[in-house]
Amino acid sequence: MNLADLKRWPAAELIDTPDALHHCIQQWEGLKVLGVDSESNSFFAYRDRLCLLQVTADGKDYIVDPLP
């Protein structure tokens, strides 16, 4: 992959409302493959807190913001 390929890479969709997340979950439910990666602040905190969720589904990337 070269720089020109990266420039053509589609932008990820930001999911930052409960309604948007609900809509995406409905789309993802029927898929056979779903890629998920999570980021948390457990390195600097006593109790883990989910800070970011990244999802790849059906060739599209999503960034889920779980923070209020």
Image (tube, rainbow, N blue to C red):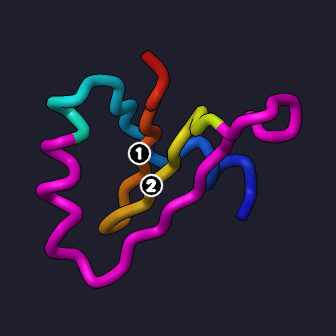
**Image quarter in which the C terminus is found:** top left
* 8 falls in the magenta region: no
Instruction: Using a 10 Å C-alpha cutoff, classify the residue at mark 1 as few (fewer than 14 neighbours), some (14 to 19) or many (20 or more).
Output: some
Q: Position of residue 32 (x, y in %)?
A: 28, 83
- Is residue 57 toward the left or the right of residue 67 in the image? left
Q: Position of residue 12 (x, y in %)?
A: 44, 40
**Image quarter in which the N terminus is found:** bottom right
Give the answer, above or below, for where 55 lies relative to 23.
below
Q: Which residue type does callout 2 highlight?
A: Val
Say which of 1 and 14 sits in front: 14
**Label 1, on which residue?**
62
Q: Residue furthest top?
A: 68
Q: Along the polypeptide, which appears first: circle 1 or circle 2?
A: 2
> Which range of residues does the magenta coloring cover?
22-48
Q: Residue furthest bottom?
A: 32
Instruction: Using a 10 Å C-alpha cutoff, classify the residue at mark 2 as few (fewer than 14 neighbours), some (14 to 19) or many (20 or more).
Output: some
- Identify the image quadrant of residue 23: top left
Question: Which numbered circle lies on residue 28?
Answer: none
Secondary structure at numbered mark 2:
strand
Contact between labelled residues 2 and 1, with CB atoms less than 8 Å apart: yes
